[in-house]
Amino acid sequence: MTGPKLDTQRETAIQLVVLTLLADGVLASRELEALDRHGIPELLGVPRDALIQAVITHCRTLLERPARRDTVRLVDVERFEMLLDRISDPDLRLLVCRAMFVLTKADGTISHPEQTLLRNALTRWDLTLEAVRARPSPQE
């Protein structure tokens, strides 16, 4: 990636969004449309290309894992929680949860894995669904 290096918390935000996009095992076109329609990369302060590249990289990583008897785990809750712990900025936490909420609803169904990720983020960061759904005030 060219340009200034993203800070660690924003890189982590990208990873959390990627895991949300792929949690149900399908990268739906409506999710990508929601990503653009709501300006999620811009709100998170990351280039759209960096986010899309992170999706590609994550998918390649899943595909390159050695063959195992069990299925590929798209949702690794322990890894997800570790990523949540890397973000300390309360404003970025709220933005990530808002992005997760928008993306999980984008295809019309919030799958069980998506519910799990969203619930874990809300709990870990002590946020309510009402706070996430609230529109930011002009002062924000």
Image (spheres, grey):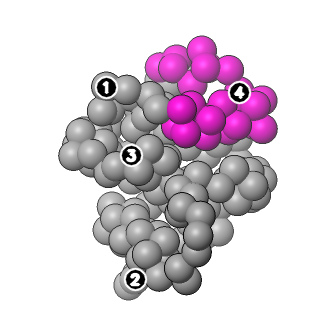
Q: What is the magenta range? A: 112-135
* Disc on the earlier residue, 4 or 1: 1
Residue at numbered disc 2: 1
Q: Which residue occupies 24% across, 39% down?
A: 30
Describe residue 139's horizontal placement relative to residue 90 as left or right: left
Depicted 37 relative to depicted 14: above or below = above
Foreground label between 2 and 1: 1
Residue type, mark 1 in image: Gly
Depicted 2 relative to depicted 21: above or below = below
Foreground label between 3 and 1: 1
Q: Are marks 4 and 1 in contact (CB under 8 Å)?
A: no
- Quarter of the image containing the C terminus? top right
User: For the residues marked 3 and 1, what is the alpha-carbon distance in whole angstroms?
Assistant: 18 Å
Where in the figure is residue 34, as x and y percent of width and height? Answer: 29, 39
| In front of the other: 3 or 75 | 75
User: For the residues marked 4 and 2, what is the alpha-carbon distance in whole angstroms?
Assistant: 33 Å
Q: Main secondary structure of the magenta part?
A: helix
Label 4 Cα neighbours within 10 Å, binned few <14 / some 14-19 / many ≥20: some
What number is the disc on residue 127?
4
Residue at numbered disc 3: 40
Where in the figure is residue 9, as x and y percent of width and height? Answer: 64, 61
Q: Is residue 87 visible?
A: no
Residue at numbered disc 1: 108
